[in-house]
Image (tube, grey):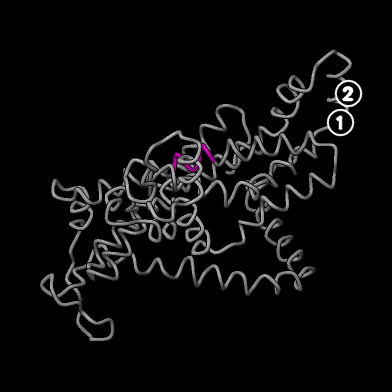
Amino acid sequence: MTSVPKDFGGKAAAKKNKTGFFRQLGKQWQLALMSVPMLLYVFLFNYFPLWGWRNAFLDIANERGTLIPFLSGQTPAWYGFKNFTNLFSANAITFQETLRNTIAMSLINLVLGTVSAIILAVLLNEVRNRKFKRTVQTVTYLPHFLSMIIVVGMAKIIFDSSDITPGPINELLLTSGLVKKGPNWLGEEKYFWWLVGVINVWKEVGWGTIIYISAMTGIDPCLYEAASIDGAGRFQRILHVTLPGIRSTFMILLIMNIGHLLDTGFEIQYLLKSSGTMHVAYTVDLYVMEYGTQTLDIGLGTAAGIFKSLVAIILLTGANFIAKRLGEDSLL
C-alpha cells in the first residue's frame, strides 16, 4: 500500500500556491508596476503617520510645559496611559461633550442621508421621462463637488436671522405669518445638529442616490413583470421588489457608515460654529486639532485620535459580524 506523504495538502499545496502566485505576478507585471504609486501613497499617508501614535504615551512637553522640538535630541519621558485617563477624567467634560456631539451629529447624518438617498433613488427609478430623470440626477449630485466653504457660506445666507435682511427661510416664515420673529438658526444650540444634518443631506444626497440607482438597474425586470401580473400596484412593486433588491447595497453602505460614526466631519462644524453654539459644535476632530496645534498638548490630542480609530475599528467589525449572523452581505 502506497504511503501518503505527511505534507500532502499542507506544505506542498502552500508551496504550489506560492509558486503560482509569483508566476501570475510575472505575467501581470505591468499591472503590478502601475499599482506601486498607489501603494506608496497609501503607505505614506495612511500607515507611516501611525508612528506618531507613540506621542500619546510620551511626555512630549518638557515638564508638561515647553514643547520638546522634534530634532532637539531630547528624549521625551514615558507618560504611559495618563493621556487616555485624562480624556475620561472627571474634569474632562470637554471631551465628553465632544463625544456626545460627534455621535449625535453622526446618527442624524446617517439616518437623514440614508433615508433621503433611498427615497430619491426610488422616485427617480419610477420616472419614465429620461431627460427629466437625468436633469434631476445631475442637479442633485453637483453639490457634492462644491467646497464646504461655499456650502456653509450659502447656508449662512439662506438661514440668516437678522431683522434687517433676513434669509429666504425666515423671510418666508415671516411673510406667511407662521412666526412673528424669525428663529435664530445659526445662533441657538437646539438648531445646530439638525442644521448640520440638513446641509449634509443637501450636499451628498445626489451622490448617494447614484449608488442606489445603480443597484436598482441590476434588478431583474422579470420580477416587476411577475408582480404586475399578480396584480401588484406601483407602491407594492417598490415595497416587494425594489427595496429588497437594494438590500445588499444598503447593508454594505450601512456597515461602512457605522465604521465612520465618529468621523462626522470637521469643516462644516468649524465654519458654522459661533459663540452661542460652541458647546454643541465641537467634534472629536476639532478636539484633536485644538489640543494638537493650538494648546500644543500633542499627547492628549493623539490619544483622542487613537480612541476615535479604535472605536471605528470596533464598530466596523461589530456591524460586519452582525450582518454575517443575519445572513446579509458583509465587507469582511
Above or below, 104 relative to 12: above
Of all residues, the one furthest to the left in this rendering is 63
Dominant secondary structure of the residues highlighted in magenta in the image:
helix
Circles 2 and 1: CB distance less than 8 Å?
A: yes
- Estimate the x, y position of residue 54 in percent, counting from the top left: 30, 66
Residue labelled with disc 2? 225
Judge the density around disc 2: few (<14), some (14-19), many (≥20) Cα neighbours within 10 Å.
few
- What's the magenta region? 106-112
What whole-number distance in Å separates the C-alpha atoms at marks 2 and 1? 6 Å
Regarding mark 1 in the picture, which secondary structure is present there? helix
Report the amino acid beneath label 1: Pro
Q: Which of 148 and 238 is in front in this view?
A: 148
- Residue 221 is marked as 1
- Estimate the x, y position of residue 251 in percent, counting from the top left: 60, 36
Q: Nearer the viewer, residue 63 or 93?
A: 93
Above or below, 89 relative to 318: below
- Estimate the x, y position of residue 86 in percent, counting from the top left: 18, 53
Report the amino acid beneath label 2: Glu
- Estimate the x, y position of residue 311 in percent, counting from the top left: 38, 46
